[in-house]
Image: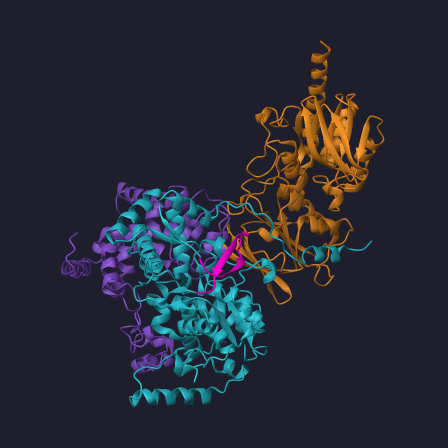
Chain colours: A cyan, B purple, C orange
Amino acid sequence: MTIPIEALKRKKEHFDRGEDRRALADPRAELLDLEARGELVVQKIDRDVVTVPTKYGRDKRIQKAHLWHHKSCGQCGHIPGYSTSIFWVMRKLGYDYHDPKDQTSCTAWNYYASATSNTAAQAAVAVRNFAAANETGFFPLIHCGTSYGHYKEVREELIRHPELRAEVREIMAKLGKQLVLPEEIVHYSEWFYALRHEIAARQVRDVSQVKVTVHPACHYYKLVEGDAIYDPDVYGGQRTAVVTGLAQALGADVRNYSTWFDCCGFGFRHILVQRDFTRSFATLRKIEVMKEEADPDVVLTHDTGCVTTLDKSQFAARAHDRNVGVGVMSEAQFAALAMGAHPYKVCQLHWHSADYRPVLEKMGIDWEQAWAEFQADLKRLERGEKQFLDWDDVDS
Amino acid sequence: MTTTDAAKPDAHYKAPQVAGYADVPYEEKARLFDLVKSDLRFGDYLYGCYECGICVAACPSARFYDFSPRRIAQAAAREDVELIYQQMQEDIWECSQCFSCLRCPRGNNPGGIITIMREVAVSNGLASAREALAGYSRIIYKIMSTGTQVSPDMLQPDAFPDWGPETGDVSANLDLWRRALPPETLHTTTTGWAVSDRTLIELYLIWLHTGSLDMIAEVDASLHAILQELMEERLEDEGIEL
Amino acid sequence: MSADTVAVIGGGPGGLRAADAITEIGGKVVLIEQRDFLGGTPIAENYAGLTPHGEPARPQIERMIEAVTSHPDADVRLGSVVTALSGEPGAYTLTVRGPAGDQLVECGAIVLATGFTHFDPGRETQLYGYYEYPDVVTLPDLESMLSQHQVVRPSNGQPPERVCFIQCVGSRDRHIGNEYCSKVCCGVASKEAIEIRQLLPGSKVYIFYIDMRMYGYWENEIYWPAQEKHHVQYVKGMITEVIAKGDRLLVRGEDTTMGRPMELEMDLVVLSVGMEPSAGTKQMARVLGVAQNKYGFIHAVGGPLDTVSTSRAGIFACGAALGPADLEDTVSSAAGAAMKAVGFLRRRAAVSAD
């Protein structure tokens, strides 16, 4: 008699999630129900969408255009090529957006670091930003993984607790605003995943020689996990599909490593005041394991804190001759490069610490020449020919 | 540092001067735990505990510190007031707040319980909170006064020496490199996180109305006074009375 | 055939025992099975040995089948599905779609024995990679290998040196929504662990668990021999993730009693998948109009002292259609349901004779 291995393998060829019975109800339906009862205002998706599958099988709709960019304080602070690449890709694909000036940070970095805030304040900060988006008619798209995760938490709390809704409504009334939440809370990496085929169709650089590892952001897929995208065609539907799905669509050589699910070590307070923990965790549990098991040219991730931690933690380890040295960037920057973006004028890789030059070479980019081009632009600024570079300059 | 040394014996049995924080009567510990339990999220964050360790295996802090999200959930589920006080003084600031522990099959949220315990530690001025926030005043000032914890001028010389020489290059060229950023909002360190006047007023109203500002009175009285004056003056200029 | 007949829906161990019991006490039965063979999940999933004693499954189930098919008062309809119910208690008419088209079956009472399905580990909220790695299998997957007296790694066909079982997959989980214990997985995993140790004496076999639940005689029949005679390693602590490392699988968890994180490399990982209502159970509940509990199993309305009555008079349920059940529970409740069903239609007959 033979062992039924082939039958076992056939069983696993495709995961069909089917009907799922999960503890938490559909937050979108609950929001619409609360709106019908006059408790809050739901900002609706009102343009073309791409529908994507999530962890428990609920379809999530990603609006393609007319988006309100909820920027990330950390990206604007020290990884400006991250947000610039998001904007650049959106412009290239011809989708309009709004870059607001009446936005605050979600303040969750501070909250998870110091706890010097409370539920009502955190909910009010979130709702104030959502109300500001709603006033413009542009639908919010959130740049930071922590903002995304925290806002999902806030949404859960507001759905569960009528007394919190009442308190936030009262505060919003003092600001002349309503309690507004969007129909879906959407992270930019979901937009990139949803648009991955449009992005790949505009690809001009071959990335098939680039060995990629992916670090998924905890606050994206562990915090209020039901919103995260899971695709049966990526990791058999067993891990979140964002970042990886895009890298695969671009044809990169995506590789596995055994600490894929580990946190990066950011720690919120640790990155600021206990950096020894962050450095140790990022190098020992992430970078060194990737190096040993996958030998990547670049690690792609999708959150401000993760890019920061993985990129900035390698310098000290290198000084101790540890097995580190992997370029770090967001998948937005990687996609922009694949679509022909300038590594310095758009992706702003000179703000990064780990060596990104080998990955540029694998993509066929002459980084010395690109740097010279960027320096020429800086000279123009120094000579006073222009006060600032703008979008016309980066694509010239 | 509190409990980064894994070899340290149970501090609960130590004299206060050795433990680094004052022992307090049982009633005070019970009061603090009651505050934790009275948070509206507590019932969403703790059901029961299987003591199965799924949360520990996923926890980054458990690998580097003598820290265990399972012990946090167990202590809270057992209503062990003494142990919870000890955890509020020793353990809670080691958590990375990554929420990997949300994989709990019971639906517990040990990281969320810690968030609440931290809030109580801050608003009650516990020694652990004072110590954890000692180097943190500048950031709290920033977030409460401008709405962002890290601002576009954060990369100052020598601010992040362990981030490598590239970070030094950024700070040396900060203004010029900012001017080369194509999005209009990123052009300068002041516009990089532009918060309009109206937005700032709205934010101050949120901090004041939710009691968020008052939370820091016990851990940092002078910072609290500075921020309160700043906010009230600004609101007064706008003709807003609280 | 008519009001003196009981219709049994489902031809697994529960349905077979119910049909057998009905004829034993002088009743007539129509047994309706959607598959074209009898025996239910133990046959469909190639079970090796039955829990707890580990005796080969097929000959034992075949004896049950023989008892029913050879009885003159039993009418077995294979490849048949109930599509409608009409009439009233004591005089029901079932529409049965089968190989000969739609047929009407008249009966006085009905026993639902539609059973369970194994939880699909693709829906697990821990990170076990069932659809990613060939060497992550389930209890029934391993059972089908054991039925051929061989255990190999599906990735390379080689016998594994290190094997682990992960308990409570798809059970006792608030996120998934299956809050219940599936009852049998501790015993089945331990039985399979013994069988692996017997087939591969050089192997190391671990069971990672939250609580080991082998009550009654399962304790001395399975748990103790597994530990004492076969040296299966039991570790209290759950696995949070399974991920490839080289050509092996790395499992991560906490050894809670030792209070330390574990990272162990395995050749084969077995997921102890729990029970969910079968598609047939959910479908029949709708067709017959009987209430389901929040998990989709048939709701038993009679409390702990009547485990087989449903929300509709004259319709009874047994075995894993009611919720997680081992074989011992299943045949016991099947006999109880048979007794209730025959008693019901005889009482009706007595009333109408008056």
Q: Quadrant of residue C84?
A: top right
Depicted C178 relative to depicted B206: above or below: above
Depicted A370 relative to depicted A80: above or below: below
Q: Seen in the image, is B217 located left or right of residue A40?
A: left
Q: Quadrant of the N terminus of chain B?
A: bottom left
* Image spot of residue C169 (x, y percent): 59, 48
Q: Seen in the image, is C20 located left or right of residue C271?
A: right
Residues C253 and A272: in front is A272
* Image spot of residue A246 (x, y percent): 54, 68
Boundaries of the magenta span: A46-65
Q: Seen in the image, is A78 located left or right of residue A233?
A: left
Residues A5 and C165: in front is A5
* Image spot of residue C301 (x, y percent): 58, 27
Instruction: Report whether residue C223 is seen.
Output: no
Q: Quadrant of residue C351?
A: top right
Instruction: Report whether residue B44 is seen.
Output: yes
- Residue A258 part of the magenta segment: no
- Residue A59 part of the magenta segment: yes
Q: Which residue is painted at 49% across and 68% down in the image?
A: A286
Q: How many marks?
A: 0
Q: Which residue is painted at 35% across and 71% down in the image?
A: A76
Q: Seen in the image, is A235 located left or right of residue A274?
A: right
* Image spot of residue B70 (x, y percent): 45, 50
Residues A208 and B167: in front is A208
Q: Quadrant of residue A376?
A: bottom left
Q: Which residue is painted at 44% across and 62% down in the image?
A: A187
